[in-house]
Image: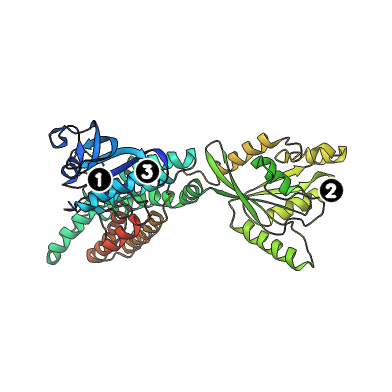
Amino acid sequence: MHQDTIIALATAQGIGAISVIRLSGKQAIKAVNQVFHGKDLEKQPTHTLHFGTIRDGNEIIDEVVVSLFVEPKSFTGENVVEISCHGSPYIVKRVLQLFINQGVRLAKAGEFTQRAFLNGKFDLAQAEAVADLIAADSEAAHRAAMYQMRGGFSQKIKELREKLIHFASLIELELDFGEEDVEFADREDLRVLVKEILAVIQALIQSFSLGNVIKNGVPTVIAGKPNAGKSTLLNALLNEERAIVSEIAGTTRDVIEDEIVIEGMVFRFIDTAGLRETEDKIEKIGVQRSYEKIKSASLLLYVFDLTEIKTPQDYEQELADAQYFGIPYIMVGNKVEYASDMVWSTLSSYPEVELISAKNKEGLENLKQHILKIVQGENFSTGDTFITNARHYESLLQTKNALDNVLAGLNRGVTGDFLAMDIRQALYHLGEITGQITTDDLLANIFSKFCIGK
């Protein structure tokens, strides 16, 4: 364990009803006891609360409640003290200074969680989930972070690694008896195991698409021809006048983005310039940006003006324009209040079209349900366990490459030393995920992204 004691503000900075200051380290309880007037904290049991005052000499700084967590029964595995004081920036500053004067050090970003990892309270994947949990801004993101923090993903990785370690040890044993030409690891059993592990890893790799959009929001582009009602639809979904609406075609010259939560999932809606040929230099740039946004999106809401549908061929052209981008899409027919009988007859053959009036906010609930169905459907869904972390994704790709090499080696009948080399690589990359394999640079990079005080 680390020898020094660290301190940081654990709640958000600024004025509030309460601020919580956290200390962790061997001397944490002793340090607080020196400035706390109340019970003798060094004689109190773990997981207890104590009311008293924090004093600088004879001066009372504040009345506080102190929470005690005696090692190893704490978040970090060390002695931890949390001081709940009034949320005055002045009081917080004075209290922090009291402990700094005692030699307590200000914590680095993520240092409390890093100590918890180093002291074996949880593995690296679970530690990273702590940051994801803090940043979660939707039900889906919260659920994913909680599953990972409670070890669901880590357990799956550990099970795969343990199965592979068994065969690795047998092959390593063969190398010790290299001159006797013996095989302790059945090659066919190894082939079956590697294929089994590869199937799980491939599913996890594919799940990154869903995990990424759950964590960062689903990029959803609203596109279509000028004056189809794209900006009006964005305003209706957001329930505010976010985009300028005008009868003049080409009003939107640049992309406009905002977020909305639909049944616990964040969507980043992006309103784009109308798709058309234009000689206007500014509008032309906006159209180009629209194409770029659509190509990088997860979902396209293609809005078309129902009053412009004169023949079935008109709709077929709109449909072809939406399909051109090659991403999941929903056809959204706007201005339903003005739709002609011919339009109703034409679209009766296309029940998947969402008919709305963005201006009157009609049909929006059906559209939202259709959006959820697309995102949670076969295009994205991969099961209960999915990857939300780019570092885990990269390690899984490296693991897959190593295991592919094992299979190729088995097919070529290579010797055990070559198989062992590739298996070691697979074990190394799996170990990177949970922290069984780490470097100082890796840990510094991960925990530097945490907030101070966590």
Give amino acid for label 1. Answer: Leu
CA gap between label 2 and label 3 equals: 55 Å
Q: Residues within 10 Å of mark 1 (few under 14, many from 20)?
A: many
Q: Is residue 117 above or below residue 139?
A: below
Which residue corresponds to mark 1?
23
Q: Which of pointers 1 and 3 lies earlier in the amino acid sequence?
A: 3
Q: Is residue 110 above or below residue 149?
A: below
Q: Is residue 224 above or below residue 372?
A: below
Q: At 15% across and 65% down in the image, what residue appears?
A: 178
CA gap between label 1 and label 3 equals: 13 Å
Which residue corresponds to mark 2?
308
Q: At 48% across and 40% down in the image, what residue appears?
A: 140
Give amino acid for label 3. Answer: Thr
Give amino acid for label 2. Answer: Glu
CA gap between label 2 and label 1 equals: 67 Å
Local SS, label 3: loop
Q: Is residue 157 visible?
A: no
Q: Position of residue 31 (x, y in %)?
A: 18, 45
Q: Residues within 10 Å of mark 2 (few under 14, many from 20)?
A: few
Which residue corresponds to mark 3?
11
Q: Residues within 10 Å of mark 3 (few under 14, many from 20)?
A: some
Q: Nearer the viewer, residue 451 or 124?
A: 451
Name the side, left or right, on which 124 lies relative to 58. Answer: right
Q: Nearer the viewer, mark 2 or mark 1?
A: 1
Name the side, left or right, on which 40 lies relative to 145. Answer: left
